[in-house]
Structure formats: C-alpha cells, structure tokens
Amino acid sequence: MSFTDWFFSDLERPESAHAHGDTSKHPWSRVMCLTGVDYFSTLGYQSGIAFLAAGLLSPLATLVLVLVTLFAALPVYNRVAAASPYGQGSIAMLERLFPGWTGKVFVLVLLGFATTDFIITMTLSAADAAAHFVHNPYTPPSLQNQMNVTLILLAILGAIFLKGFKEAIDIAVVLVGIYLALNLIVTLVGFVHVLLQPHLVLNWKNAVFTQHGSLLSIIGISVLLFPRLALGLSGFETGVAVMPLIESENLEARISNTRRLLAAAAKIMSVFLMGTSIVTTLLIPAADFQEGGPANGRAMAYLAHQYLGNAFGTLYDASTILILAFAGASAMAGLLNLIPRYLPGFGMAPEWARASRPLVLVFLSVAFMVTRLFHANVDAQGGAYATGVLVLITSASCAVTIAAETLLSRLALGVVSLVFIYTTLVNIYERPEGLKISFIFIFTMIFLSLVSRAFRSTELRITVELDPQAQALVAESANKTIRLIAWNPRNTAIKDRDQAKIELRELHGLLHEESIYFIEVERGDTSEFTETVAVQGSCEGSNRVLHATSPAVANAIAALLIQLKRTSGCIPHVYFHWADIDPIINLMRFIFLGEGDTAPLTHEILRRAIEDPAQRPIVHVS
C-alpha cells in the first residue's frame, strides 16, 4: 500500500474509524469514566489556577463554582440530554431552533468555540502532564524542559491517532479509578494535617477578613471571582456526547441513565473541587503557586510529594500524566467526531476532511502553534479553555430556555442563562486570549466552509422520489423521449403553458405526439446541502406537471433528468430560457440561495455526474 492510500484509507468510509470510539453499549457508570478522563483530570491543575485567580478566597470562589455546577449547569444539561438522545448536544439543538442559514451560522460559530475547547484541552493537558513530569525529583535534568516535553506528548498523541486509535472504556475506568483514589488519599491526608494544625484555619480566616473586611464583602468578591474558575465546569458537553454508548432498553432509559451519569460526575467533581481547594490553599505557601514555583500547575502533586513521600508522589505524577494524556486523546477523538458530523451535511467540508489522518495532522499542527503561543504554560491557557467551555454551556442554557414549554421553566432557565452569559463575558473581558483564538478558528472554519460549498455546489447532491401520480405520468412515456419545460412555479396559467408547448414545437420542430412535461421546482431551505426531494405529479388541463421543492433548483432538475432516463430508458431533454442577470450574482445566488442561471448549472451538474456525453441528458437554452 502506498503512502497516499494509507493516508486517505478511510476517505470512502461513511464514518471514520479513527474518529469513532467503542460502539458497544456499557453501563452508565463505566461510560462516566470516559467523560471523567477529561472532566476529572482538571483536578491536576484546577486548584492551582483557582488560587492564582482568587488567592485566599479560592475555597469560597470554588464553593460558588460548585453551586453553579449543581444548580445551574446540571439542570441545563439534563434538558439537553432529553433533547438530543443521540449525542448531538446543544449545537444541534440550536440548529433545530434556528432553521436555515441562521442556524448554520450558529453552528459554525459554536464549532469554532468547540474547537477552541478541544484544542486547548489537548495543549493544556499535555502542558500539565509535562509539568508533573518535569518537577518529579526522579526526572533527569536533561528532560526538565516543559516546552519540549509538552511537544513530545502531543506528537505521541498524534502518532497514536495516525496509527489508529479506538477509545477504550476499560482503560478509562482504570485510569479514572486510580486517579480519583490517589486524589482522595492526598486530600484526606491534607485534611489530617489541617486538623493537626488548627492555627492554619485561624490564620487563613484572619487573613481573609484583614484583606476583604466584612463577610458580605467576602461573599460578593467570591461571586465576582467565580468566572476565573469556570474551567472547572468542563465535562458536561462531553457527558452528552457519549450518550450513544450508554446501555439502555430505549431512548427514555438512555436519557434517564445519562442524567444519572451527569449527576454522579457533577457530585464527585464538586466534592473533589472543594476538598482540593481547601487543602491546597491552607497547606501550600502562596509563592509556590506562582509561575516557576513547585506547585504551579500541580498543587495536588506537590502535596503528594510533601506529605506522602517521593515514591507515592511519583505514583501520583504517573497517574496524572496518564489521565491527562488520555484527556488529550478524548479531545482529539471529539474533534474528529464533531467536525465531520456537521460540516459535510452543510457542504462545507473539503473532500480530504472526510479522512481522519489529514485532520489529525491539521489539529496537531494547531496544537503545536497554540503550545508555542502560550509557552506550554498551564495558567496562561486557562482563559482560552474556559472561554470554549463557557460558550458551549451558555449556548446550551440559551437553547433549553428557548425550548422550555412553560413560563416558569423559561424564567428559571433564563436566570441560569444570565448567570452563564455574565460568566462568559467576564471571562472574555479578563482573559481575551480565548476569544481571540476562538475567532481565529471561527474565521478559518467559515472561510474554508464557504470555499468548500462553492466547489461542491455542482455535485449531484439531491436525490428524487416520484409520488404515485408522478410515476403514473412518467409511465405514459415509457420508452419515449421525455421533454421537460422548466417552468416558474408562480405562473399557473394553463393558457401560458399551452402557448409554451406550441412555441417549443415550432422552435425545435417537434411532433405533436412528443411527450412534453412541465417541471416546477420551488426553493426550500437553501442552507441545506443534501436532501431527498419528493416529486409530485398532477394534470392541469392537458398539461402534465411535475412539481418539487428543493434547496437547489438546478441540482433537483439534474437529479430528476437522471431518474427519468433510468425510468423511461431514453435520454430526456430539458428546455430553459436564459436568465438576464450578472453571472457573478448568479453564482452567489446559486451557492447561498439555491437558484441562479439554472440552465448552465444544470448542464454542469450533469457533466460532473455522467462522464459519457452520449449518455447525458440534454440541456437546451433559448
């Protein structure tokens, strides 16, 4: 097999083997671990980022995060799960709520933010894994370069996907189980040391009140600081995405089990967020959290080495590195699953994007650039990560608010939406790098999508189905040449149709016995790219009329001509009038509105679909 054959080996497959994971069904508790490799792995750096963001108020700001997780994000995604039982998530909800180009634009923008989320998950996870590796006391000095280690980890991740990666829930269960167990041990040991040194709590309390004054001020500042900790909300969108893997008897059971998964993950994460925040804030000196400090990006590992020895600390480091690496793999799989799921259906993906290996190289190159841009710094990437997470959660909250059936539900969900909108705006204002990176992804995605749609617009992307009356009308011309007059659907006058047939016979010297039909195609949702069009037959006086509604007029007529050739056994003819419109405007109208100078476009579609000119339906223009 040549390199090209190997590189594009899955190009013709309807679903990428690399992009999709385990297709068997599993209990929700095991599937939760697949979500957990991304969600729970944030414990490796969340407490450190929280202290840098909130200082001594980190536990209180984390409490606000926990309350938002349990009473805002969780209810929202319970509704998302009910609305998208096949794992489409909030993006598909918004596409359904806003049909047409409005919904497509929403999807493209959200895909940009989702790409930011997944790419930063890869780079941040690799950077934090590198931090644990570099700061381990057994690491040789020659390997203590965080940038190089991060790039090596990303390269290994890319190599795995180029070879062929299949998500393994069994691996996820083991990694999550070991990682949570080690975090539990470190957290409990941390609390024991806090209990043995009660002055730590007293000193912390005095320092907080000295810095911020009253209790009301402390609560208010903690609420205001909460957006800086928002990356701790990651995991909900992934939790919905894995729904198809959950073992269930029917869709209702799948939704119910998904809600159990989301609730269990949120509760486990909330307990660990609070516990790790408290022990790291009380036991680690503030200076050690700063960039270059031993606790920067690895606060829990710092405690593991400090209180349980280097052997246990190394075990904790190894567990953290593995789960963070697997979180990057989960993010890569998410990208390879998400992008092809939407863009090809919009006609907005280049041909090579259907093959996973080229996409792996694209995403890997972007991850390298992002790592260089942020200097493999965990703290610096927190804002970009939080932006992607928050925009997806905000879009989900807005979607379920719009879809709510009762006024009370809409009001309650509206308040939740306002909370996430505020959180997102504050995060963007304080850390605009996330929005900048998202805009780069959005612009690139939209530009490539429009170019792809333009190039693919003359594909035979419509299929037709004749209704019984249309089949009966066509059957009257079996083994005869069928001639179609392209007709404006708004012109229903029988007199005009009769005149058109007379002019056609005179112009082309046709006999009276020739089978002449009228084809009327109305525009449907022009934002759709592929569609099965129902052709309806009717008789209006002596005229036989075939009527259809399609997102692209020329494509529908071309598909009907091919179907008629197949049915009648003869090459059909279609007759058009020239459109007196600028050709550039015609092109834009065709790409975005599904109409334009239909005659040459129909001919081009037929030319691309049928190589042999002798077997191609004939297009006439006058």
Image: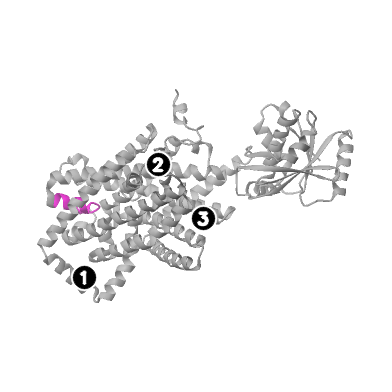
- What kind of element bears circle 3? helix
> Which mark, residue 550?
none
Mark 1 or 3, nearer chain start:
3
Viewer-side residue, 273 vs 385: 273
Q: Does residue 98 belong to the magenta stretch?
A: no
Residue 417: image location, x then y, percent: 44, 64
Along the horizontal axis of the image, is 584 left or right of 186? right
At a point 25% along the width and 66% down the height, the residue shown is 57
Q: Give the residue number, with chain letter if any, for mark 1.
A: 208
At a point 35% along the width and 56% down the height, the residue shown is 233
Viewer-side residue, 136 vs 215: 215
Q: Is residue 400 visible?
A: yes
**Which span is picked out in magenta?**
293-306
Q: Give the residue number, with chain letter if any, for mark 2.
A: 333
In the rendered structure, are the residues bearing label 2 and label 3 in contact, judged by CB atoms less than 8 Å apart?
no
Viewer-side residue, 377 vs 315: 315
- What kind of element bears circle 1? helix
Against 406, residue 512 (above or below) is above
